[in-house]
Amino acid sequence: MNEHKTIIELSNINKIYNLGNTKLQVLFDICLQIYEKDFIAIVGPSGSGKTTILNIIACLDRPTSGQYILNDIDVNSKSNDDLSEIRNKSIGVIFQNFNLISRHSALENVQMPLLYSDITDKKTRTRKARECLEMVDLTDRASHYPNELSGGQQQRVAIARSLINDPDIILADEPTGNLDSQTSRDIITLLKKLHEAGKTIIVITHNDEIAKETMDTINLKDGKIV
Amino acid sequence: MISRYLIDNIIEAASNLLRNKPRTLLTSLGIIIGISSVIILVAITNGAKTIIEEQLVSLGAKTIVLKPIGRTRSGVYRGMAQDFNQNELSLMKAMPTVESVSPIVKTSNQVSYRNKSQVVAVVGSNEDFARINDWPTESGDFINEMDVQDGARVCVLGASVQKRFFGAEDATSQSIRIDGISFKVIGTLTEKGLTPGGRDQDDFILIPFTSLNRWDYKGQLYGISNIIVSSTTTEDLEFTKFSIRKMLRETRGLLKDEFDNFEMVTYEKITRKILQTTNILKILLSAIASISLVVGGIGIMNIMLVSVTERTKEIGIRITIGAKSRDIVFQFLSESALIALFGGAVGIALGYFLSQLVSNFVGWPAIISTESIIIACLFSGFIGIFFGIYPAFKASRMDPIKAIRNEQ
């Protein structure tokens, strides 16, 4: 059914939060397979566990039980620092509220992941960051600070930052949630472009327009795939 | 590779600190005060130490006082004491590590000038007496080598004698009679005052010790009761002592199992004790000053904790995009170390400036050793790192999911 190889494989993932005396299970036996160059939407009501799944896929969180294979690597067996490296190199994350560092310019924000990579040459860093800003059509805003940019522009800076290390996977948690419909459309176009360029993209969204563009939609309800 | 990483971190830390200058300055104030007070105190005590050392040397840290004693196996008594003689004196004078030798012959005689007549202590010595005792003349000259060679009938008056016999009038060039023999006054000595024990140090007449011997009509020669020897340097003191002892034992033909019939007193032990005391003082004062360094360090820790809390979201973002825990630790340690090093540098400059000021005020030199500057630098760096560790580790252990949701 799909000629591409599996890039993400979740098997029997459970996530239980300890809230003092009570335990809250947010994910129940999630099994999920995502192939290279997929464009997937995760939808569901709030509290259904969408963000928790995304955090686990992003290697920001660990499942309570179950196995997560990313690019043939068993993620659970890796240390936090190894996970940092995986996030740095193979995963780009985009958030609803952009999460840029306000005291750094757009260009500095975009090149920040390089600070934690092997690329130490300052010129290479700047060149790469400029290329990424060019991809999101923001070269003229390179020296602007986040509070000098519109929401759509900030999100494009965040997308440029997620692209800097040329990751295979882009994860977006409601990327248009804080944007008006016109800017949302720009961001959708941008994500489509990235998909066409060969990235695997997983988007959590309420936006039907995004869901329409994706290859597949995963529906979550009460921590289960329905 | 590593150095680029280091430079990036330091630039980042510096720009961060510059964004909030008043806070950075106030945070480093504790270190500035601590380092500068350590620098000042060490400089001032070092200065005081050299002054004390100089004074001790002038008071006789390199002199040896020779006294005759009689000693038997059962103990010490004065009876067998053997005075020193002129031969021994000239042998000592010929020693390479001996700077000067001054004999002391003590007697007291009837002294008269015009209608005044009194018994006064008369001390026979030589031209080195003034130098060894650091005792300049108030007016006129001191006795010289020729006077000693010739046994000249000249004398120098102690300040009290000058006052008693001549009052306000200058005694120089006048003649006085000692035991009826006329002596010409060639000078008077400056006043030394009382000893701690209350003895008047200025109440004597000094004459060439040779003339004392020549003039004694009773046919009885005065022995040299004390000799004060001054060594060329403090370091040579031990060797000088050793040479004198050897020479005296040989000339006096003492057998191996016989005790010395003389004694040598030095101020070495006292000197060492006093210098030790100043060292203890220095350590004590620096320890007190170091307390402010610790307080300064706690100030740094406090501000770094605030800074970590303020930047929770930033830390979350950094971890999300790939920062490892050591990257976060390093980022915050760079900041705390930089604050401390800045404080250290300003503290050294301020300490240098203030110790010159204090030095002018107290009137002794402030000696700033490179050693104390290096120690100050290392110590402030250490404080910055030590008190930065806890906040930095706290930052590095953050859960990125929680941290990134933090809105400040």
Image (cartoon, coloured by chain):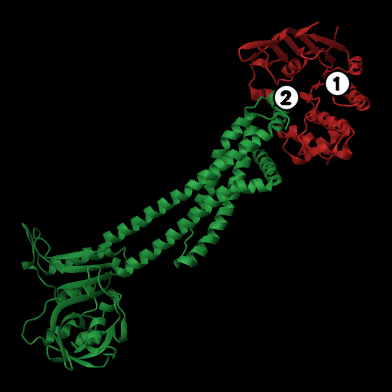
Chain colours: A red, B green
Position in image of residue B324 (x %, y %): 66, 29
The numbered mark at residue A198 is 1
Q: Secondary structure at mark 1?
A: loop
User: Residue B383 sits in which quadrant?
Assistant: top right
User: To which quarter of the image does residue A118 belong?
Assistant: top right
Q: Disc 2 marks which amino acid?
A: Arg
For residue B10, side relative to residue B204 (left or right): right
Q: Quadrant of the N terminus of chain B?
A: top right
User: x%, y% of residue A103?
Assistant: 76, 39
Mark 1 or mark 2: which comes first in sequence?
2
Nearest the camera: B338 or B112?
B112
Q: Nearer the viewer, residue B18 or B329?
A: B18
Q: Chain of mark 1?
A: A
Q: Eyeballing the image, is B330 above or below A185?
A: below
Residue A200, placed above or below residue B317: above
Q: Amino acid at mark 1?
A: Gly
Mark carried by residue B204: none
Q: Chain of mark 2?
A: A
Instruction: Report whether B229 appears left or right of A10.
Output: left
Query: Residue B222 in the image: x percent, y percent?
Result: 11, 79
Direction from residue B26 to residue B92 in the image, left or right: left
Viewer can see residue B322: no
Residue at position x 80%, y 31% in the image: A161
In terms of image quadrants, where is residue A42? top right
Residue topped by disc 2: A87
**Residue A171: x percent and y percent?**
80, 21
Q: Looking at the image, can residue B213 be seen?
A: yes
User: Marks 2 and 1: in contact by CB < 8 Å?
Assistant: no
Disc 2 is placed on an element classified as helix
